[in-house]
């Protein structure tokens, strides 16, 4: 079985791009702490938006979808799941809730990971919920002409439990002894988890939930306010490219984790930048019109009312609608389409 030892990673010299990303994330995390002290109530509204986006995006990556209205109802726990997709979405919501509320008590061990997986499938009658895989799984790609190709073969079922214990033990050792920068250790752990592919189903969603958990436990709370899952979904091809590039040679212990480390750190930094932009829109006392005007200045190309709502969580829907109408009437924006297909463009 593949042996997991982070000693080689600990001794590795990182290039200037990775060091720059790590430094930039720490800088933005410090700003976030300051923001939270200044506007805690307004920023709390970002939490609900992030929960909806995270639940929707992480499931959509795996082809698990429902309507926007149903997503909001399910995340708010105002309705019961109607079908298998909604059961899986509700399960993701439940795990995310546990992580948000209890991350500091969730240890990084196989037992806790299995418990989270069991919650993920808690809305369904799945006999393999909370259990490692019992059949060999494969990571494959399907091409436009219809043919499929196996890109990577994860560990066999009999190796999985031991491997999970090993990556948890190594992660806890280097973090506990402060031997490795957490922002390096976290992507390495997630990459190893995805290469092990420990479950028959739910590996991708579990990896994204574990990313949030590990970041929270290391003091990086951006995922609470800005959806990391939505950022991954928006650049899904880059995610898979980075993962595939880092998987080569993994079974022999000769992999290069750098592509995946850079991808994940870039995603985390982008989320922090978004958080800073949203904070700037609620900082100071501005009219609804001026706040919405500033939000539209952050948009390139077409955007929707919902895009502006996400940037302006402190404003009511009616205030946003009225401000958008005024900006159209003033000639600052152009509106196209009607109803749910209404889009806006900046004119100036």
Image: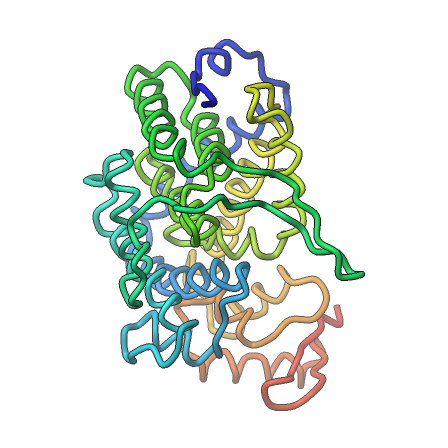
Residue 45 placement, left or right of 311:
left
Q: Position of residue 296 (x, y in %)?
A: 61, 67
Rendered position, 251 above or below 128 = above
Q: At x 45% / y 54%, what residue is drawn?
A: 226
Residue 166 placement, left or right of 311:
left
Q: Position of residue 203 (x, y in %)?
A: 45, 48
Asked whether 290 or 72 is in front, the reply is: 72
Q: Position of residue 118 (x, y in %)?
A: 28, 54
Q: At x 32% / y 62%, what residue is drawn?
A: 126
Q: At x 63% / y 20%, what residue is drawn?
A: 16
Q: Quadrant location of the N terminus? A: top left
Rendered position, 59 above or below 192 = below
Q: Quadrant location of the C terminus? A: bottom right
Q: Position of residue 266 (x, y in %)?
A: 58, 39
Asked whether 299 or 172 is in front, the reply is: 172
Q: At x 38% / y 43%, what residue is drawn?
A: 210
């Amino acid at each position: 079985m593949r042996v997991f030892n982070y000693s080689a990673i600990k001794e590795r010299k990182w290039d200037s791009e990775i060091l720059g990303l790590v430094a930039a994330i720490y800088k933005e995390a410090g700003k976030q702490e300051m923001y939270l002290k200044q506007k805690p109530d307004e920023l709390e509204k970002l939490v609900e938006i992030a929960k909806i986006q995270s639940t929707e995006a992480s499931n959509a990556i795996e082809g698990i979808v429902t309507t926007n209205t149903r997503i909001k109802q399910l995340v708010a726990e105002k309705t019961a799941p109607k079908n298998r997709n909604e059961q899986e979405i509700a399960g993701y919501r439940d795990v995310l809730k546990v992580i948000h509320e209890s991350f500091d008590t969730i240890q990084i061990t196989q037992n806790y990971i299995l418990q989270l997986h069991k919650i993920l499938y808690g809305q369904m009658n799945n006999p393999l919920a909370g259990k490692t895989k019992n059949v060999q799984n494969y990571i494959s790609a399907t091409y436009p002409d219809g043919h499929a190709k196996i890109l990577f073969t994860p560990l066999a079922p009999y190796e999985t439990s031991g491997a999970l214990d090993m990556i948890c033990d190594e992660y806890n050792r280097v973090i506990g002894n402060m031997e490795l920068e957490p922002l390096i250790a976290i992507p390495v752990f997630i990459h190893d988890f995805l290469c092990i592919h420990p479950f028959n189903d739910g590996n991708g969603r579990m990896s994204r939930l574990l990313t949030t958990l590990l970041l929270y436990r290391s003091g990086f709370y951006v995922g609470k306010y800005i959806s990391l899952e939505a950022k991954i979904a928006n650049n899904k091809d880059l995610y898979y490219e980075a993962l595939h590039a880092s998987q080569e040679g993994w079974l022999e212990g000769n992999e290069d984790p750098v592509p995946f480390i850079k991808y994940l750190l870039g995603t985390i930094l982008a989320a922090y930048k978004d958080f800073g932009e949203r904070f700037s829109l609620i900082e100071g006392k501005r009219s609804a019109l001026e706040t919405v005007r500033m939000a539209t200045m952050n948009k390139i190309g077409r955007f929707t009312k919902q895009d502006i709502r996400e940037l302006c969580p402190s404003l009511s829907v009616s205030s946003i609608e009225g401000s958008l109408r005024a900006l159209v009437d003033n000639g600052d924006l152009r509106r196209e389409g009607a109803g749910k297909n209404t889009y806006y463009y900046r004119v100036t």
